């Protein structure tokens, strides 16, 4: 059965996706959510064939305000156009992307700029922040990562998370305490 995790794009390959309803809570699914869920069926490296089954209740409706039946919603989802998705990255995500782009481009500053401009969505200007923290250096058209910036790239950590980890390591002697503190902080963050 489909779930909100599948709508969010969690990599959960399945041979078959069954929609027992076309609503999530009291809202009809969006075309994006529907396609994300549907796209789990028959992933190339896992299955030869994928099946999607929609169990629409004839005349069924979950919303008094929309007035649509479930089969009308099904037809709309199957024929609907996906909206363009353009994420907006915060500084944490932007620094993660920037250091990854530096690695991929082997430090060629012009290539990093080109890669940044071709990405879908809007990135924060990460280079000044990374320079301020001493995580990268600019030399003759190249961007060099420090060892800490390489850690960021290898572990998909943004600058804020890196600073948090460095602070915890300075304050705590036991690595298990550092990990526990990071886990507790993650649980407290709003999702």
Image (spheres, rainbow, N blue to C red):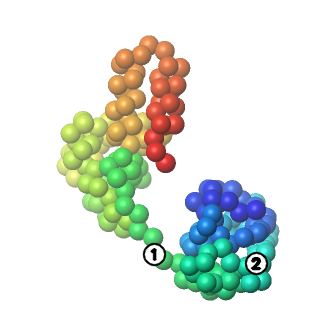
Q: Return the x and y of residue 7 as percentages of the image width and height.
A: 61, 63
The x, y position of residue 16, in whole percent, is 79, 66
> In the displayed structure, does residue 4 sit left or right of residue 84?
right
Classify 10 Å Cα crowding around label 2: few (below 14), some (14-19), many (20 and above).
some
Are the two marked residues, 1 and 2, in contact with CB atoms closer than 8 angstroms?
A: no
Q: Position of residue 83 (x, y in %)?
A: 48, 77
**Quarter assignment of residue 9:** bottom right
Horizontally, is 135 left or right of 97 in the view? Answer: left
Tell me which residue sits at (51%, 37%) in the image: 187
Question: Which residue sits furthest top?
Answer: 173
- Tell me which corner region of the image, top left, top right, bottom left or bottom right, holds residue 189: top left
Are there few (<14), some (14-19), or many (20+) residues within 10 Å of tag 1? Answer: few
Q: Is residue 35 visible?
A: no
Front position in the image: 19 or 58: 58
In the image, is residue 139 above or below residue 87?
above
Vertical side of 15 occupied by 12: above or below: above
| Residue appearing at x 21%, y 39% in the figure | 132
Quarter of the picture holding the N terminus: bottom right
Callout 1: SS: loop
The foreground one among 34 and 131 is 34
Residue 127, x across and y down, in percent: 25, 49
Residue marked by disc 2? 56
Residue located 52% across and 31% down the image: 183
Q: Of helix, strand and loop, which one carries label 2?
A: loop
| First along the sequence among labels 1 and 2 | 2
Q: Which residue is mark 1?
A: 84
Q: Nearer the viewer, residue 171 or 33?
A: 33
């Amino acid at each position: 059965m489909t779930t909100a995790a599948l709508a969010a794009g969690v990599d959960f390959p399945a041979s078959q996706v069954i929609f027992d309803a076309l609503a999530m809570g009291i809202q009809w699914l969006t075309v994006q959510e529907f396609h994300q869920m549907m796209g789990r069926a028959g992933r190339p490296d896992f299955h030869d064939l994928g099946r999607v089954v929609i169990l629409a209740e004839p005349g069924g409706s979950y919303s008094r305000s929309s007035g649509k039946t479930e089969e009308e919603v099904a037809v709309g989802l199957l024929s609907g156009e996906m909206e363009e998705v353009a994420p907006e990255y915060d500084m944490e995500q932007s620094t993660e992307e920037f250091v990854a782009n530096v690695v991929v481009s082997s430090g060629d500053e012009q290539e990093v700029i080109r890669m940044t401009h071709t990405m879908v969505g809007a990135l924060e200007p990460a280079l000044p922040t990374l320079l301020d923290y001493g995580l990268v250096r600019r030399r003759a058209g190249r961007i060099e990562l420090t060892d800490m910036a390489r850690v960021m790239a290898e572990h998909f950590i943004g600058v804020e998370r890196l600073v948090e980890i460095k602070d915890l390591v300075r304050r705590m002697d036991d690595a298990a305490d550092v990990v526990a503190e990071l886990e507790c902080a993650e649980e407290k963050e709003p999702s």
